[in-house]
Amino acid sequence: MADYVSAGVPFYRSKEIIEKHKGNIISTELFISEEQFNAIKEKFGVPTAGDILLTSVGTLGVPYQVTNIDHFYFKDGNLTWFKNFKKKS
């Protein structure tokens, strides 16, 4: 994705997810426009609270559970997205 902008919705790769997993501040900030985020959201959906992202390149298998305050999108090839968890009764 080459549509980065100087400010907007954070766009995470494995590196940023590892930093979030460790509780660190994101050291390299990439952004996409709010318009592009909304287009992606409408077409594919976006991470929501409770979803889990798992690093799939570089350092493998580092998890991050999305929180209520998260607002971002991610590089699809770098992370595996687990969503739609259902509780068993």
Image (spheres, rainbow, N blue to C red):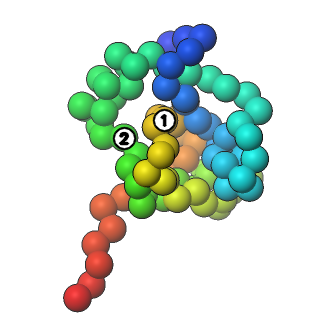
Q: Amino acid at mark 1?
A: Phe
The location of residue 53, given as percent across then percent down, is: 52, 54
Instruction: Tell me the residue at 44%/16% (across/down).
Output: 33
For the residue carrying disc 1, how many other residues have a C-alpha within 10 Å: few (<14), some (14-19), or many (20+)? some
25 vs 34, left or right, is: right
The location of residue 87, given as percent across then percent down, is: 29, 78
Instruction: Tell me the residue at 60%/11% (across/down).
Output: 6
Vertical arrangement, residue 8 with respect to residue 79, above or below: above
For the residue carrying disc 2, how many other residues have a C-alpha within 10 Å: few (<14), some (14-19), or many (20+)? some
Locate the C terminus and report the quarter of the image it occupies. bottom left
Q: Which of pointers 1 and 2 lies earlier in the amino acid sequence? A: 2
Mark 1–mark 2 distance (CA, rounded to whole Å): 8 Å
The location of residue 60, given as percent across then percent down, is: 68, 56
Q: Amino acid at mark 2?
A: Val
Mark 1 near mark 2, Cβ–Cβ under 8 Å? yes
Label 2, on which residue?
A: 46
Examine the image and state in which quarter residue 2 appears. top right
In terms of secondary structure, where does tag 2 sit? loop
57 vs 87, left or right, is: right
Tell which of 77 and 9 is nearer to you: 9
Label 1, on which residue?
A: 72
In terms of secondary structure, where does tag 1 sit? loop
